[in-house]
Amino acid sequence: MAAELTAMERNMKRRQRKRDLVAYSFIAPNFIGFAVFTLGPIVLALLMSFAEWDGSNQMKFVGLQNFINIFGDDRFMASLKNTVVYSIFTVPVTLVMALGLAILLNQPIKGRDLFRTVAFFPYVASLVAVAAVWNMLFTPAKGGIVNQILMNVFHAAPLKWAASSSTVMLTIIMFSVWKNMGYYMVIYLAGLQGISEDLYEAASLDGANSWQKFIHITVPQLKPTTFFVTIMLTINCFKVYDIVYMLAGGSNGVVNKSAMVLVYYIYEEAFRNWKLGQASASALVLFAIVLVVTLIQFRGEKNYAND
Amino acid sequence: MKSKKANRIIGRVIVYVLLILLALLMLVPFVWMISASLKFNKDVFVIPFEWIPKEPRWQNYIDIWTKIPLAKFTLNTAKLTLIVTCLQLITSSFAAYAFAKLEFKGRNFLFLAYVATIAVPWQVYMVPQFMFMRSLHLADTHLAIIILQAFSAFGVFLMRQFYEGIPDSLCEAARIDGMTEYGIYAKIMLPLSKPALSTLIIFTFVNTWNDFLGPLIYLTTESKKTLQIGLKMFISQYSAEYGLIMAASVLSLIPVFIVFISLQKYFVAGITTGAVKG
């Protein structure tokens, strides 16, 4: 009897093992690539931030020296400050524009799908191409179309835009809002479509006007969406690199302190100065910031789930 | 009653005016791009700006092919995009099937590894990743770019979310009929997951086609460069060739435009799936 049971057990075990193997065979093609080329480097990034390494000589562990170095480097501090400034302005402006667009494009109007496509296209358009146009529209010369509008319509002095340290961040922020708001508009559209029509009808019966409906129904109902958009936007803002490279990088791609951002600093330390330890330490700072934002999101999400 | 109707008309007018203003804001750079691509350099900044050039200079669209190896760049990008998209689609949907429909040892732990890395920006580990690839002699190869893009956690996550929505009873019934797991994946799941696959195609296509930082770090030989890097190189070298720069820019947008227009329905759906994941 006992022997029979173990035979059965063994049989079951064998079948379970076979099932495991089938499952692993499904996962393997993706997981091997993922583990070797993503998980591995992530662990390596941690190690490297505590080491001194130029990429060819022996790696040497130096404890927290890299962190002390970067926080004493005014180029790092400038890049941190610029990234924060960029995020502080880009996040709310993009958010408001995206919400506005979504509300407009949620109305029953003619050509709605066409308008949506138009609003979304800058997001998928290649950055190099659209940045090239922006550089020409916002050329520091008086002949640029934007400077012409400034001078002739607003009777203001022409600006130097990306060529001046006082307006370069402004130019980058405006470009970023223009390029990305269509993406967040789509998220808001989905949020708007999730709001029950009944709420608006009830409010209409109570005599509420459009503005009151917006403040008392739309805004509170969209709270989870707004929360999600804010987090996504913040994380994406901290990852900014190519916009800055395209708009503020000179012909050799060198960005000066007035527009330098975190990822640019990482890139420069690693691939121009070959200070890989310092590059990894600043990458870890970037990760810490993104992690904090993500954790806030998780907590916020829990709160909404409990509501 | 009358004033209410008047109000509504005024509201409508405001909505349309705002929409047209916004549409202009979005479109003007593209129109300007096309317009400038058909001009002599000296005419690009002439005031008042000529939106429709009287004598369009189509020659720009011919010259650009000989000025830089644009055909080579386009071919490289197309090759990379095609391979990455196929690999991404196959490996992600394959792995996602196991995560969604199979019970096995270590499932939760492995899936957690995927989910956790979605939160780690690529920029955080791009440096060690490059050093690792370099030690494998993969720096300055297309293979590196393919590896970089083809095994994303995002793809697995997206496909798994979709598969979760397909009832388990469908798989069970097939298993009872004696179908293998591979058969269920190929004959039942794949045909059902067209919307998710389309979303993944667009995301991967657009990301790979437009990727800049990856190829910038990895590709140093000119003949291996992608369209984005090549375009940027051209802009740096010939910054005053406005007409040619704009012609090249217009050309680089066409493939994305075509893919976007033909699959845009799924793209919007995909973003919302991404939003739900939170």
Image: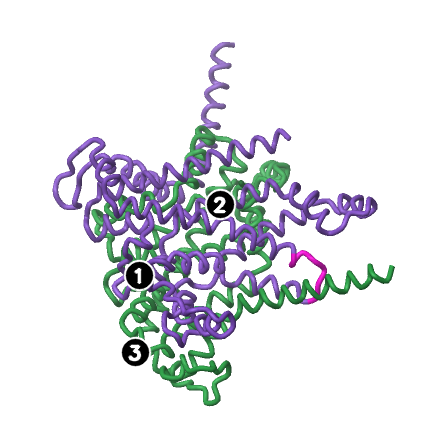
Query: Which chain does the numbered disc 3 sit on?
Result: B
Which mark is first along the chain, 2 or 1? 2
Q: Main secondary structure of the magenta part?
A: loop
Total numbered circles: 3
Q: Is residue B205 visible?
A: no
- Do discs 2 and 3 belong to a common subunit? no
Tag 3: amino acid: Lys
Residue lying farthest to the top in this orientation: A2
How crowded is the residue under tag 3: few (<14 C-alpha within 10 Å), some, or many (20+)?
few
- Tint of chain B: green
Camera-side residue of A307 and A205: A205
**Circle on res. B67:** 3
Callout 1–callout 2 Cβ contact below 8 Å: no
Callout 2–callout 3 Cβ contact below 8 Å: no
Q: Position of residue A244 (x, y in %)?
A: 36, 57
Residue lying farthest to the bottom in this orientation: B55
Please tell me whether mark 2 sits on a helix, a strand or a loop. helix
Query: Which chain does the numbered disc 1 sit on?
Result: A
Q: What's the magenta region?
A: A104-110
* Residue wearing tag 1: A249
How crowded is the residue under tag 2: few (<14 C-alpha within 10 Å), some, or many (20+)?
some
Judged by depth in the image, the label closer to the viewer, 1 or 2, is 1
Tag 1: amino acid: Gly
In whole angstroms, how far apart are the C-alphas of marks 1 and 2?
Answer: 26 Å
Q: Is residue B44 magenta?
A: no
Q: Position of residue B183 (x, y in %)?
A: 53, 45
Rendered residue at 38%/58% (across/down): A243
Residue lying farthest to the left in this orientation: A57
- Quarter of the picture holding the N terminus of chain B: bottom right
Please indicate whether residue A205 sits to the left or right of residue A97 in the image: right
Judged by depth in the image, the label closer to the viewer, 2 or 3, is 2
Rendered residue at 63%/47% (across/down): A191
